[in-house]
Amino acid sequence: NAGVTQTPKFQVLKTGQSMTLQCAQDMNHEYMSWYRQDPGMGLRLIHYSVGAGITDQGEVPNGYNVSRSTTEDFPLRLLSAAPSQTSVYFCASGRAGVNTGELFFGEGSRLTVL
Amino acid sequence: RKEVEQDPGPFNVPEGATVAFNCTYSNSASQSFFWYRQDCRKEPKLLMSVYSSGNEDGRFTAQLNRASQYISLLIRDSKLSDSATYLCVVNPTYSGGYQKVTFGTGTKLQVIP
């Protein structure tokens, strides 16, 4: 069972470079989201989506773009990487509705920006 | 006030002890609540849902107190393998129908031999 698949698992970027973190789920979940986790900060929501074509901002959206063209995929784009974006990124999916909080996470993508 | 607040700990407890964590939330319209467990350098995983009537799963008990706006997680007979960070999740519903899932910062538990 694939569940939620994130790629790449590790990435090193130089300041100003752009890249896309990929996220795919095979559970037909409506809800997908991206979080970043920094030491002592917990999980902070970047962007989320409740279905194909519908996205919204979370707490820390600046510097990131998302799109949701299919139910399965929810890529996160870093437009111009900055050292402050060094973090661990998690993608998560779940059903929409009252139980949206029952999320399944990918294994994470560890990004370092030099 | 933050939407979801947890004591970061760490809670250092001996094996066999009972330990409890609380998580307070600010949105009184919140409808559903969950506890997650996260091991070091791993992804969070759902531990249990929190129902209005409480929820028990083996050594773990989750409770909801709507009047005081907090949820709790009780772990009995702590095992070394329970050492992890425990995250609470509160799921509010917004008038636009969009739902954002907010995590607490987590409480770190270290069970000591």
Image (spheres, coloured by chain):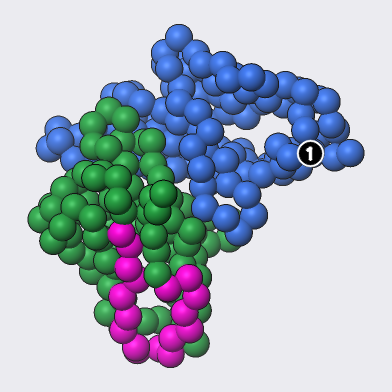
Residue highlighted by disc 1: B80
Question: Which residue occupies 64% across, 19% down?
Answer: B58
User: Which chain's residue wears label 1?
Assistant: B
For the record, the magenta segment spans A8-24
Residue A35 position in % (x across, y down): 39, 56
Residue B12: which quarter of the image?
top right
Amino acid at the residue labelled 1 = Leu
**Residue A67 forms part of the magenta stretch:** no
Image quadrant holding the N terminus of chain B, namely top left
Image quadrant holding the C terminus of chain B, namely top right
Question: Which residue occupies 23% across, 55% down?
Answer: A72
Q: Does A102 sit above or below residue B49?
A: below
Residue B71 position in % (x across, y down): 50, 24
Residue A3 position in % (x across, y down): 38, 50
- According to the colouring, which chain is blue? B
**Which residue in the rendered view is the most extreme toward the front?**
A1
Left or right: where does residue A16 sit relative to residue B17?
left
| Count of number-bearing discs | 1
- Quick one: B91 or B44, which is closer to the camera? B44
Left or right: where does residue B40 sit relative to residue B36?
right
Answer whether residue B25 is visible to the viewer in this image: no
Residue A57 position in % (x across, y down): 24, 56
Drawn colour of chain A? green
**Residue A16 forms part of the magenta stretch:** yes
**Which residue in the rendered view is the most extreme toward the right?**
B113
